[in-house]
Amino acid sequence: MQINTQTTAAAAPTNQQLDTADAVARAAHIWIRSLCLTELHAPAERHALACGLVFGLCERLELDPRVQELVAYVYALLDDEGSQALAASRMMLARSVPSIHLHAYKKGRSEAAAIVEMLSYHGDNY
């Protein structure tokens, strides 16, 4: 009888996956900041908007779950979550927001759809 002592570990993300995660998170962060400059949002509402945007972008861009986690984590770091970045990133992908801020979450998802549609349109015309 042979015992397998090798453990199966998740493969480290590739450079392309890291670049994708970084680019999507930075784009989401810039988009949220620009929205917040033109509209007033309470911190909890802004968080719900960001959750919807990040999840929506990951979903629309069909990113694999590992890259989605990286996107949410990078976004949380960019948003100055500090030591709470990991917890904040997990909450982002959990799609759980208080019902009072559900409209902001849905707006974030809608913004994500518009961004991806715009990228698709411009990609087709070049």
Image (cartoon, rainbow, N blue to C red):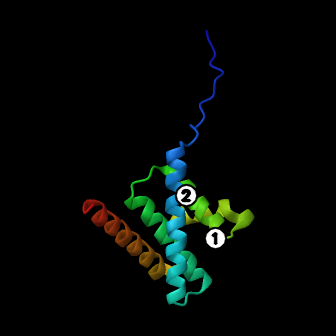
Question: Left or right: where does residue 75 sit relative to residue 99?
Answer: right
Q: Quadrant of residue 10?
A: top right
Residue at the image point whose x is 53% and y is 63% from the top: 25
Front residue of 77 and 84: 77
Q: Answer yes or no: do the residues labelled 1 and 2 have beta carbons within 8 Å?
A: no
User: In the rendered image, which quarter contains the C terminus?
Assistant: bottom left
* Residue pointed to by mark 1: 79
Identity of the amino acid at label 2?
Asp
One can see residue 3 in this view: yes
Can you tell which mark lies on residue 20?
none
Identity of the amino acid at label 1?
Asp
Residue at the image point whose x is 64% and y is 16% from the top: 3
> How many other residues sit within 10 Å of disc 1, few (<14), some (14-19) or many (≥20)?
some
* Residue pointed to by mark 2: 22
Q: In this view, does 85 lie above or below 45?
A: above
Front residue of 101 and 52: 52
Image spot of residue 2 (x, y percent): 62, 11
From mark 1 to mark 2, how far is it between C-alphas?
13 Å
Image spot of residue 5 (x, y percent): 66, 21
Question: Left or right: where does residue 14 sit relative to residue 87?
Answer: left
Residue at the image point whose x is 45% and y is 59% from the top: 58
